[in-house]
Amino acid sequence: MTTRRIVLTRGAALVGAASTSLLLPTIARSQSDRIRVGLMLPYTGTFAQLGVAIENGVRMAIDERGGKLGGRTIEWFKVDDESEPSKGVENAQRLVQRDKVDVLIGTVHSGVQMGIHRVARDTGVLNIIPNAGVHAATRSLCAPNVFRTSFTNSQPTLALGKPMMDKGLKRTVWITWKYAAGEEAFEGFKESYTKAGGTIVRELGLPFPNVEFQALLTEIASLRPDAVACFFAGGGAAKFIRDYAAAGLKDRIPLWGSGFLTEGVLDAAGPAAEGIMTTMHYADSLDTPRNKQFRLAYAKAFRLQPDVYAVQGYDSGLLLSQGMEAVKGDFGNKKALYAAMEKQTIDSPRGKWTMSPSHNPIQDMYLRRVENKDNKVVGIAAKALADSGAGCRMAG
Ligand code: PHB
């Protein structure tokens, strides 16, 4: 288990330096003026890059707003969750019980999220979800202290079916990792594609994070569908794209997907990714001053190109920071803080978005095409798309 715990604030150095009794009252006050922020993200495994992008985004948003939260100095804590669901509860408890974080930002993997969710509901700690799309978190198990800045797993694929049918792709094979994210992405795809008149000829799957795609690609070749649609992400997505091309399918059967397929992987996937069509709540090439300014600042700060995960991290930082500013740092007043967070409009690089009653973004979905290692916007696939929030009863 790799647990990294860091405490790094300008304030930490101050506390260490202050050794005279004369300074003690000031120290006591400055400590209570602090806020403890825990990051529970994958830093190893197939989603490692996603975790890094999210952390970069969170820090960048907070730094841009002065590096504090409602005037409070931040102490940071980190845990590598390895995208390992069996350790989800234990890792969340480390942050909440041992490190006593006030806010837990995490995570990427839907299975791990359910562990965080249990701890968040049991302890009441504020949880901001910067990626994992598991439906229950903002549907049947929604909670006043849980906010998502990303998407539900079926949101991107609810926008996928119609553009495929518009292109005359009437028979599709679906393929994914068999766990909550893939299965719920399929729900969105099935609903939108069958409603538009399409036929799903086969559902294929393999366990997460397996990348032995060969037998399934052979099956696709023999089924000869009009198109393939999928959910994959991170390192596994890059491998799927390369294997799809290597199997000779790229020029015969168009590849479509939930946009994660082509996020943060375009360098690793190379020419095999050109032409892939996806739907997603962000696109690199969004032609707005806000997105351009964000991309320049991110590239300058981290020497990396941002992707949807960086944007979701950035928006998590914005949501927390704007909420804390609205209550002037009065973190103890949870009712006021959560009411303020519910009301925020987030001026995101993806476009402005607001929070649904079940605490999930209401947002546009873009249709994108990979061109010259870029996710180019082709159009808007769905405007102001909200998740159903089915079964959500917000207590308290
Ligand atoms: C998830 O497990 O919810 C998940 C992981 C990676 C993504 C999207 C969703 O890119």
Image (tube, rainbow, N blue to C red):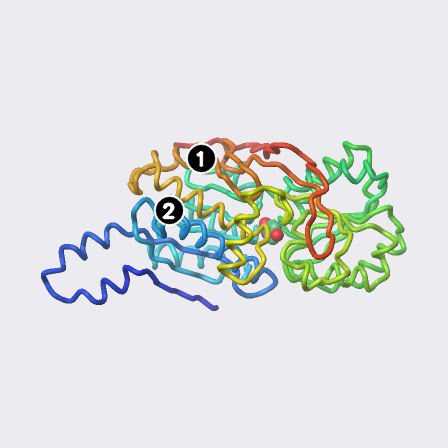
List x then y, in percent, for residue 289.
56, 43
Q: Residue at x 80, y 49 (%)?
A: 228
Q: Position of residue 316 (x, y in %)?
A: 47, 46
What is the x, y in percent for residue 56?
Answer: 49, 57
From the viewer's side, name the closer residue of 371 and 77. 371
Per the image, the residue denoted by label 1 is 344
For residue 75, the mark is: none
Q: Secondary structure at mark 2?
A: helix
| Depth order, front residue of 382/302 | 302
Q: Give the quadrant of residue 367.
A: top right
Q: Secondary structure at mark 1?
A: loop
Residues 167 and 299: in front is 299
Q: Where's the C terminus, which quadrant? A: top left
Crowdedness near tag 2: few (<14), some (14–19) or many (≥20) residues, C-alpha within 10 Å: few
Q: Is residue 65 left or right of residue 32?
A: right
Q: Amino acid at mark 2?
A: Thr
Q: Residue at x 47, y 35 (%)?
A: 345
- Pointer 1 local density, CA inside 10 Å: few below 14, some 14–19, many at least 20: some
Please name the residue that numbered disc 2 is placed on. Answer: 123
Q: Residue 74: x and y, percent?
A: 33, 54
Q: Are marks 2 and 1 in contact (CB under 8 Å)?
A: no
Left or right: residue 327 versus residue 226 is left
* Whether residue 346 is situated above or below residue 310 in the rendered picture: above
Q: Amino acid at mark 1?
A: Gln
For the residues marked 2 and 1, what is the alpha-carbon distance in whole angstroms?
25 Å
